[in-house]
Image: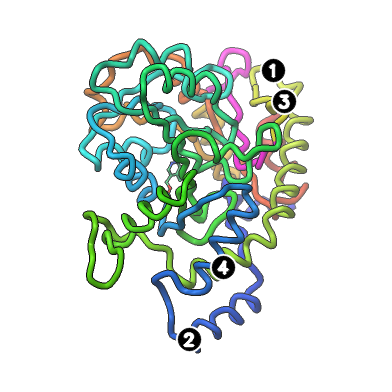
Amino acid sequence: MNKEEIIFVTQPSLPPLEDFIESLKDIWESKWITNNGKFHKDFEQKIADYLGVKHISLFSNGTLALMTAIQALELEGEIITTPYSFVATAHAIWWNKLTPVFVDVDPVYGNLDPQKIEEAITDKTSAILPVHVYGNPCDHDQIKAIADKHNLKLIYDGAHAFGVEENQQSVLNYGDLSILSFHATKVFNTIEGGAIISHSLEMKQHIDRLKNFGFVNEVIVQEPGINAKMNELQAAYGILQLKEIDDNISQRKRISEQYRKQLSNILGITYVDEKDNTKHNYSYFPIFIDEEKYGMSRDKLYEKLKENNIFARRYFYPLITEFTPYSDLVKYDLSNAQTMANQVICLPIYSELTEEDINRILEVINA
Ligand SMILES: *Cc1c(COP(=O)(O)O)cnc(C)c1O
């Protein structure tokens, strides 16, 4: 066991280099490097099939996908969202010149609490934007009922939810639109990348125009679009990644099981139980530290792991509402989110993490 070797919270899985070189040769030969080329078309079809979704539009990253999703639905005024997420969730609202309204999360999964949404709805509210945090599905039935009752749009930030299913159905089919991120740190990556899942061909075509300057054809620009296209290299890489993803997820499952087994008896440490009827992707392994019971604060443990060359991450700390652009916007009690943010550490999880690595991590936690 090499204590010097740095263990990061994640490590991207890369496709076999020889295979990628073959794709690159093909791209070099055709000289078609972006703008809906053959790899893009092929990847779009293959990933839709893999995920079990009807329409998907590929993007250069998840943040642009989320910004474009908000544009596509022509939202106005206020959007109800969660403070317990990566900051891009709120930034996408801000860049659309709309106001994020932060509502507390449930204390178990850290997902937007349906019970707290209605009190935050005003006549300016146009949509709800929940996040499937750590890939655990939101309570969609309840959230959808509220959205329908108040005639609000529903966009899911599914950046963590690649491949997640509930009752054999992709959770990415929930809502009016869902977005994905394929950033290097995510369960499935195209280096950088993202997508929007939509439910009609009409909406997909609208989104595809928006990510390409609004072009309908060479001479017609129908709407003010942006440039958020995925290029051929990303798409070719993505096609190869799809071949590895099932294996990658099952490796993560093995790691998650090992953590669960070994952490279950440690006083003051809890982790999130798996939801019933859910196919998980094991994208993160968050633990929550109760300082009094564990005998050490979260931050002390975080530093101690670091001293041992284990770089865990405090996702999501600080809360989005702690950051300057958003701190003035807090209107409602966010105490569940605050508690989770103060207690969380995400432990390393990626397919190549070995049993020795895990033991090294657990040794520090147990000491
Ligand atoms: C990663 C992430 C994003 C942003 O995706 P990028 O591809 O990095 O732009 C958005 N929301 C959440 C919850 C994320 O974790």
Could you say which is closer to the camera, residue 322 or residue 44? 44
Secondary structure beneath dot 1 equals loop
Q: What's the residue type where badge 4 is placed?
A: Asp
Q: How many marks?
A: 4
- Mark 4 vs 2: CB contact within 8 A: no
Q: Residue furthest bottom?
A: 29
The answer for how far apart the CA atoms under marks 3 and 1 are is 25 Å
Crowd band around label 1 with a 10 angstrom C-alpha radius: few (<14), some (14–19), many (20+) = some
Q: What's the residue type where badge 2 is placed?
A: Ser
The answer for how far apart the CA atoms under marks 3 and 2 are is 48 Å
- In this rendering, position of residue 39 left or right of residue 77: right
Magenta stretch bounds = 279-297
Q: Earlier in the sequence, mark 3 or mark 1?
A: 1
Q: Is residue 302 visible?
A: yes
Q: Check disc 1 and report the residue beneath it.
A: 267
Residue 213 position by quadrant: bottom left
Q: Is residue 260 magenta?
A: no
- Mark 3 vs 2: CB contact within 8 A: no
Secondary structure beneath dot 4 equals helix
The label shown at residue 276 is 3
The label shown at residue 42 is 4
Q: Earlier in the sequence, mark 3 or mark 4?
A: 4
Q: Residue at x 41, y 73 (%)?
A: 34
**Foreground mark, 2 or 1?**
2
Q: Is residue 292 magenta?
A: yes
Q: Residue at x 39, y 27 (%)?
A: 128
In the rendering, at what x and y percent does residue 56 appear? Answer: 50, 52
Q: Earlier in the sequence, mark 3 or mark 2?
A: 2
Crowd band around label 3 with a 10 angstrom C-alpha radius: few (<14), some (14–19), many (20+) = few
The answer for how far apart the CA atoms under marks 1 and 4 are is 50 Å
